[in-house]
Each structure stands twice: as C-alpha cells, then as structure tokens.
Image (cartoon, rainbow, N blue to C red):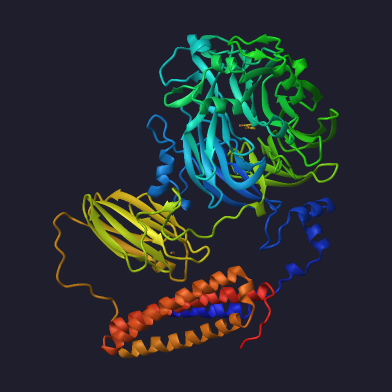
Amino acid sequence: MKVNNKRALSLMLGLAMGLGATSSAYSQASLEDVMKARGLTQKDLLAAAKTYTPTGGRDEYLVFASGGQSGQVIVYGIPSMRILKYIGVFTPEPWQGYGFDDESKAVLAQGRINGKDITWGDTHHPAFSETEGEYNGRFLFINDKANPRLAVIDLHDFETKQIVVNPFFKSEHGGAFVTPNTEYVMEASQYAAPFSSDFVPLEEFNDKYRGGLTYWKFDDKKGRLQPDQSFTFELPPYSQDLSDAGKNASYGWGFTNSFCSERYVGGIEKGRPPFEAGCSQKDTDFLHITNWKKAAELVAAGKVEKVNGSYMIPMAQAIKEELLYLVPEPKSPHGVDVNPDGTHIIVSGKLDSHAWVYSWEKIQKAIAAKKFEAKDPYGIPIIALKDALHTQVAVGLGPLHTQYDSKKCTVYTSIYVDSMVTKWDYCEGKVLDQLHIHYNIGHLMAMEGDSVSPDGKYLVSLNKLAIDRFNPVGPLHPQNHQLIDISGDKMQLLYDMPLPLGEPHYAVAIKADKLKPAVRYKSGWNSRTDERSPYRTRAGREKVVKEDGVTHVYGTVIRSHITPEIIEVEEGDTVSIHLTNLERAEDEVHGFALYGQSVNLSIEPGKTASYTFTAEKAGVYPYYCTEFCSALHLEMQGYLLVTPKGYQAKESGMVEGEQYTQADYEKQVKTNVETQAVIDSVVAFITSHNYKDFPPVVALVEDATEQLGFADEAKKKAEGFAAKGDFQNATLWAGQWWQYQVKTADMGLRAKTYLEQHGAVKVETK
Ligand code: K7E
Ligand code: CUA
C-alpha cells in the first residue's frame, strides 16, 4: 500500500518536472504524408480545420439535442461535435444518480401518469428560455410526446428540476416552444382524445374527442412552470402538430399546425382504409392562430373556468372572444416557423413540394376586417388563403422544417424525401442553393436559429437514416447529425456525427459564453429543489439517529473517506442515508453504491443526496465511492451491517490485521517530513508567480490549503498518541496525515502545471 502511494507521488513529481512524452515518429510525418496515408483530399483538410478543436480547446456553441426515445437531452459542442453530457430528464440515469437518489426520484414522480411511474420519454423539441426573443441561457424545456409532459432543466447545473403532466391530453407533439419573454411554454396535443380520462367510443369522435393547446405559465424567478396559472385552448380533433410563438410584429400570438383535419379514425382491421389514406384526402389542413396575450388577460380577469383544476378555454368562448382563427395550409404540414422579425410564417407540407410563406400583416388585416371565407365544423372562422399568403416556393419533395439565417430573407428548409437542404429567399421567393445530406433529414438547426437574431454560421442536419455512413453496429444504426458550413453562398458539408442514444428530433444551439454553469453547490444543497437540504451535515457532525421509526444516517464524503464507515442497523429497519459532499474543489465528485440495492448516488461538491430503503435481510453489505476521486479511491469504503433481530455484540472488540511499533511510527513521520518538503517547494513556486490572476489556480490553492489543514489535525492526533506511547494509533494517524499531504501535493502540482502551461510570470516576493 505505502509503496504504491509513494510511487504515485513520485510519478506526479516526475510529470510536474516535465519528464513527459517524447515525440514519436508518427508526429514527425508531414501533412502530405498523413493525407496520402489516410486518403484525404484538400476539401477534407479544409473541413477538418473548420471543425477540429485542439486539445483543451472549447467550442463556440453548445447544442442541446433531444435524446429521442432515451428520454434524455444530449449536449454537444459546435464546431467540434464532441458530446459533453447526457442529461437525465424523463428516464433514470445512473451516472448522475438521476432516479436513484430520493431527491431526483421526487422529480420523476411528478411525471407519473394515473399514478404509474413512466421511466422513459419520447423527447422531441428542446427550447431555451428567452428575454425579448434572445436566448438568455437560463433554462431549457423539452417535451415528451408519448405521455404529454414537459420538463424544466436549469442550465445553472444542467439538472432536471420539474416535470409537469398535461391535465387534458393523451399525447402531444407541439412542445416546447417559448414566447419571447418566456411568459409561456406552448404544448399542443397530437392524437385527439377525450379531455377526461373516461372511456368514450370512437363513434363519438367528432363530438367528444378533442385536440388542444396549452400555454404553460413559467415563473422565471422560481424557475418552475406554474400549473395553476396555465391555460389550455380546447381545439377541434384535428391532429395538432408543431407550434411556434409569434415575435416582434406578431408578439402575443401563437401558431399551431395540424394534419388529418379530415378527422378520419382508421380501422384497417375492420376492412376500412388505414389512417394514412383517410388523413391525406384534402388538399389543405389548418394552421391555428391563437391570441395568448388576450387569453391570459381573460384568465387574470377571472373569466375562464377551471376544468379538472386547470383553466380551459372552450372553443365557443375562444370564438366569441376572438382568440382563435384558422388558415388553410399545405397538405399534411409539419413545421411552422416564424421569422425573426415576426412578419412572416413559413409552413411546409410533407405532401406538397412547396413551402408556403404567410404574411402576418395580411392575416392581421383579415382579422381586423372580420373577413373570413367560412367556418370550420366547430364554428372557428377560416381566413381565406389568398388573404394570408405571401408566396409559395417549390423547395423540393417532402419539405419539413425551416431555419432562419443571420442574412435577411434567407432560410434553410429540410427536404425529407429528396434528402437535402434547400437554401432559399422567402422575400423574393427563389431557391439559392441545395445540398444533399445522408439521409432523409428531419429537423435542421442553425445557431441561435429560433431567436430574434439568428447567428447563421453553422447548420446541423438531423437525419432520420444513417444507412452506410458509419461502421456497422447491427440492425439498429446510430443517428447521424451532419454539420454544414453556411457562412458562404454555397453550403459546405463538414462532418458526420453518430449519436448512439435515440432519435433526436430537434436541437437548439446557444453561444457557449451565454452559459455560466456552477462548479459547486452551496454546502448541503438539495439540487432538485434548489434549497438547503434538511439532511445536510458538516464535518465532525456526522450522526445516526432514529426518528419516527426511520434510521437516518447523516454522513459526509470527502477524499478519501465516507463518514460513517460502519453503519449498524437491525433487520427490517427503514434506513435513510444522507451524504453531503464536503469538497469545494472543482470536479471532486463522489459516488455511493451499496451491495444488493439498486443505487448509485452522484454527490457533486456541496450536494446532499439521500437514499432510503428497507434493510430487509440480515447480512453484510459493503458500500463504496463510485467516482475515481483520489489515489485512495478504492479505500473509500464502508460496511452496512444488518444484524438479526435481538443480536448482542460480543465483548472482544475489533482486532486489526497489523500491529505497529515505534519504529513504524518514526518511519512514517520521516516520509511525512520529506513530503512536506516537496509541498513547500511547490508552494514556493506558486507564490512566486502571479497565480492570483488565474481563478482555477486560486481554487486549487484554496483546496490544497484546506487539505493541509486536515493534515495538521491528523498530525496532532498522531503526536498525541505517540506521546502516550500508543504507537498503534500514532502510526495509523501518521498515515492519515500523509494521506492529506498527498492530496495537498496533488492539488499543488496541478496548480503548478496550470501556471506553467498558461504563461504565468514571476512576481517580486518580499
Ligand atoms: Cu419533425 Cu417531432 Cu419536430 Cu421528428 S418532429 S422530425
Ligand atoms: Cu470518492 Cu472515490
């Protein structure tokens, strides 16, 4: 053991002294050699130079992609396309302890449907919180299509904080889309169903089945959706699809697509033509236009009734109060996208080769003049196409979604059937460029593309099929995100990124410098409620107490021990283990796993995480830290002893495997004195440089100082036992003293390396 530790220390010292890598023959090859060996073209090299991010480098944008069926969110960088994180949202994720600790189980429990735990989600559309139409980098919302739910992720720590269940819908697709100041998050149903949870026969489809659109109120300060202030529009049983919120000129309004306005109900097994035939008969479907601002005023004025405890605006009321209109749109549309200044709305029909551009000015005029061509079967006024349309542009077969460029009037539309991206001008109505992708693109995404000021630069094509693009890995292929350079007149394909998690329908990208994520929590923090945990503990205050029949373990974790190290409970006890990470150091996360229980905790610096279970069976249950946090990570361990009922401990006490003498003690002290000399030299190096100009180094120095403080306490204990002639305890405490020294040296050397690599300069020392 000791030998290993010493080797570890000398290794650290060796690296710090620059005895590192020697250059290999490979690295001496010229660029031409490498091109030749790998069969690369000039074009490849250019693409590589545009995406390659040198070691230690950062990305300009961060992408938050839906994780599709994984129920997670995937975070990656642009232009490097390096994946940084999977965020657990609707699905348990063990690395983050999500769905394993009590705190996050409570978040997942908010998403229960009819009392049943749903441990996955079909995530589709992420959306950033906005201020005046600009991404503000504070929150991310994402929907679950399968079970109509929305989740709130706080970008302060990239954790899911809330899940809400739609009180009316049985599925949804048109979420999440935010209004320009995140007043509301839009969520539209997809498959019409009764608003109640009762059985209603399909024969009553037209009368009793309904679509809908919920505007979820968001409280920016609390960072939570407010179900009691949210409201839902009752809509006809058309299959409502995607939505987008109006902005600038169209602020206060929302736009929602629909398909199957034929209201066909299928029945292939009864010899009826299938859904797909019955749902694509008409030449047009309906774009729904809703006035959320006026609806919110009615809600505030107490003029909207609650149904099932939630505000619901019936169609009759929406029509009477002039909140709801329809406009014909191309057959089986999919995307609806409002342009940055809010003056135009682009809709593409999957079964029409045109993208239709609507003029908000024309629509407003028709509404003001009450100029309608007809009413739908539910009495909703229909604005004539000619009174709403700006132009129609032939963009390709199977157009789906549209993204806006930084250049005025320039847009990119995904063309599913033709497998390409069409760049076109919606003011002039002409196609500018087309690029083939691989294969069958769904959504596409430009940098800050949903904001009022898109950045252009890059486009990501989120493809539905990968087919032959990657090494084969079985019948289930990875997803393929293709990075496209859109800074010039011609689009240029740069990179294929496989995504091995689920089908990411949509993604959003934000300038990385808008995000300011924390590196640690306030001490004793419940990260899911964003409050101090009632179960937090400080160093030296660890305890085990029985309260209301539950054995509460108030413990701590820090390199490299879990306190307590031995927990004794009786068979049948309910046990609640609460662990607080005492670390303040960046990236010093500890985990917690316990034999025979399905648990892993991720306890980041400052966090308190809990795990409650019943100790059903008497036995010995080792536990340990699951993050390789330090040289003595493997020793970060303990035992849960579940004693049989009525068990009496024997008198004899514990016997240690080794007995130590005065010579052992002195040998350890000698090592410690030598180690201290190393620490002193590192400290001298750091303090003789302008280390205070480097915040990461300041943090490391603080951490090292703290570890050295612990070393001092252990040293005093060792010396106390030595003075009493108890060399057993003296030697063990001297060993612990050395452990803290090693951690101090580790921090110090990391700080020294950082200074050397970041051009620190010598300063005058007094
Ligand atoms: Cu087109 Cu759900 Cu937005 Cu898939 S959706 S592509
Ligand atoms: Cu803590 Cu390993």
Answer above or below: position of 318 versus 336: above
Q: Residue at x 62, y 15 (%)?
A: 261
Q: Is residue 597 left or right of residue 336?
A: left
Q: Is residue 526 left or right of residue 518?
A: left
Do we see residue 471 in this rendering? no
Answer above or below: position of 575 versus 410: below
Residue 460 picture location, percent across and down: 71, 42
Residue 126 picture location, percent across and down: 60, 39
Q: Is residue 404 left or right of residue 199?
A: right
Q: Is residue 195 left or right of residue 135?
A: left
- Quarter of the image that includes the C terminus: bottom right
Camera-nearest residue between 507 and 627:
507
Residue 735 picture location, percent across and down: 38, 80
Camera-nearest residue between 59 and 409:
409
State which image quarter holds ligand 1.
top right
Q: For residue 692, which quarter of the picture?
A: bottom right
Camera-nearest residue between 157 and 58:
157
Q: For residue 697, which quarter of the picture?
A: bottom right
Answer above or below: position of 578 versus 315: below
Do we see residue 98 in this rendering? yes
Answer above or below: position of 24 versus 100: below
Q: Residue at x 15, y 59 (%)?
A: 647
Looking at the image, how many numbered discs can be counted on the residues? 0
Q: For residue 634, which quarter of the picture?
A: bottom left
Residue 698 picture location, percent across and down: 57, 72
- Quarter of the image that includes the N terminus: bottom left
